[in-house]
Image (cartoon, rainbow, N blue to C red):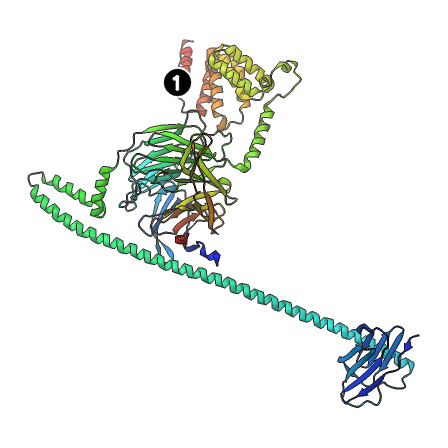
Amino acid sequence: AAGLDRPQVVSHAQQALNYTLFDCKWVPRSARLLCLGSAARGSGLLQLYELRGGRLALLREIEKAKPLKCGTFGAASLQQRYFATGDFGGNLNIWNLEAPEIPVYSVKGHKEIINSIDGVGGLGIGEGAPEIVTGSRDGTVKVWDPRQKDTPVANMEPVEGESKRDCWTVAFGNAYNQEERVVCAGYDNGDIKLFDLKTMSLRWETNIKNGVCSVEFDRKDVNMNKLVATSLEGKFHVFDMRTQHPTKGFASISEKAQKSTIWQVRHLPQNRDIFMTSGGAGSLHLWKYEYPAQRSKKDSEGAEMGVAGSLTLLQNVTLSTQPISSLDWSPDKKGLCVCGAFDQTVRVLIVTKLNKV
Amino acid sequence: MPVWLREHCWQQTASAVYLSLPVRGLRVTPANIFCTDQYLKVSIPPFLFEAILYAPIDDTNSTAKIGNGIIFFTLYKKEAAMWDSLTLGNADKEKMQYLRENAVLKAQEKAKEETEAKKVTKQEHKKYALEATMKLEEAERKRIEDLKEKERQKVTKELELWKKQQEDAEKQKRVQKGELQEVEQLKEKKKEKVNVTRIPSEGVSKTRLRSTKGHGSCGMFSENFREEQLPAPRSAATIKINFTSRVFPTALRESRVAEEEEWLRKQAEARRTISDDLSELKDLKEEEKNPDWLKEKGNKMFATGNYLAAVNAYNLAVRLNNKLPLLYLNRAACHLKLRNLHKAIEDSSKALELLTPPVPDNENARVKAYVRRGTAFCQLELYTEGLQDYEAALKIDPENKTIEKDAEKIRHLIQGTMQDS
């Protein structure tokens, strides 16, 4: 039947946890995954699982003083695979999972909880220095280099006297050579800001009228191509980042998929035009972006402006009654992904037929 | 009185009776014929034919053929016997009546039974149909489930295969690492022999460090090479940003925007003129009736040093709305500058009154109020009262060094005067 030619989301394994799960990430080059979150006793937990048969086997459990909110392997080398985490106290730590008692790098980066973290320059992807960016409730976005202690290499903070807004999400992009890099940050008042780290300036900003829950570039290590920003009220926007108009900024298309908040967006590492959004009603939607016939056109004054393409919904599935707050595709196996929801369950899913899309 | 039709003729066999009834020129429909097992009537008003049959017949199978001005009845006998005559002879009127009624009753009962039988069959058909559809749907669902299950199994197998590949790859790497480490150690030994002139411990520790760092020496080599290629950490810089302004501390949601605007509008209105019948107010422009605007004006004039004008602005604002603590607070500051100390004390006190309940939100305002009142007291040489206020301020904000210093100074002054007197 036509319905069964579409990609199917197959549930492969799941594990009930006894703590609140905030983030889950695949360990690169392996069938292992990390879950992190907050235990009932107010401490942070980091668990390492391995996928065996149709089950998840717990290999290791690490407990830390403060609850952990987010983590990334993005700035780690493939051999060392150090994991960077942000916690509820505003501390950024980088851990060697073989010896997790003492962090390899630690700094109290922010005054309040670190909501989001991203890394670039590691895992054999892209060029340039390994860097980690953290966005916090104290309204600042800071970029760290693991080789430099205590001070960030870039700090995006509000002007004196400006009342702060929570930063909810950060993402790296445009890291196609050693100098270029941008950081995109989304805030709770609907602001999206794009910072250029080469010129240390604000390159673009816009407001999407709803608090921004998650931003991601389709690829961190190429000339910036597309940016997806998801928000409250079930909306998300896809921006075409190849053409920036002097006043209108980047062209975009927006879609209202569900009634509830879209918590995360993650692009498929093996195909940058496919991405999955996870929602507050426990659902996952798989989307495909199609480029328009011409990606840019000239406006009335002759300035180049971008043209947004179109989106098709490939599949959607409801897994839980609670929001799915974290999502990660495996970089090694196409279609394998893990998602964590607020019903204290981590689920491993396989999306089939992605080759035929 | 009906007209009797009597010109009928009949024949019989062992099992059937054939009756032919001429009805010349009359239009006959099946409704005109009434037949039960022992009574036959044809009624085409005003004509009537009636026969009480000699023996019972099977009235369900018997037929009547209407055509050519004749009704031809084929009546099947219940019992195969030859009848003496078509009708039962010498029946008196009563009996005939009884027989007629009986016949009608029987017919009615029969009709009832038939309808009930029909109903029952209808029900059964419905049930059957329902079960059949359910079975079909079930089958469909099962088919889809099976397809999905097959997918799952296929995918699980692929995953297991991939995992195995990963594990094999890792084992290979480890083996390679083992081999290369052996090669390394051989190299080390060679190096040791060569670097005899150097301080032995230094030489050994250096090479040992090199080989233990990193897993997989081929990777290690390439990594060292890459580290040399990595650029230095960026020079630190700060980018200052502005946010799209938002009054509420909560996140922005489109669906709530209308409510929020409504709330803000009502707040602004509530702060406007409380009473309109002050005649001087008619001369004022719209914005001058807004206490917030007047407060801003007052602040600006204070900043430029025009304290008297600031006081005027605050006065007008207070007349419009005397429930805003910040107006009194700022006016107190002006009075301090103008050395109107009693007025400063009054205004600070009024501000403190309005700043109840004491919550973290109005901490800043309360600290300022206490400090200003304390300053005024000290300038009036009422040092004990001043100290009291400074200590209250310190209680709210213990981190503030200036308040601490000033409090110390006042204590010294008090002790000084006490010693004097």
Left or right: B19 with respect to B258? Answer: right
The one nearer the camera, A88 or A143, is: A143
Q: Which amino acid does label 1 sit on?
A: Lys
Residue position marked by numbered label 1 in the rendering: B405
Figure check: A174 above or below A11 = above
Quadrant holding the C terminus of chain B:
top left
The outermost residue toward the right is: B1
How far across and down, in percent of the image, does residue A307 sit?
Answer: 45, 38
How far across and down, in percent of the image, does residue B305 sit?
Answer: 47, 11
The one nearer the camera, A179 or B96, is: A179
Left or right: B107 with respect to B331? Answer: right
Q: Quadrant of residue A96?
A: top left
How far across and down, in percent of the image, does residue B27 sit?
Answer: 84, 73
Figure check: B42 above or below B123 = below
Figure check: A166 above or below B55 = above
Instruction: Identify which residue is drawn at 55% across, 14% down.
Output: B313
How far across and down, in percent of the image, does residue A94 sit?
Answer: 31, 40
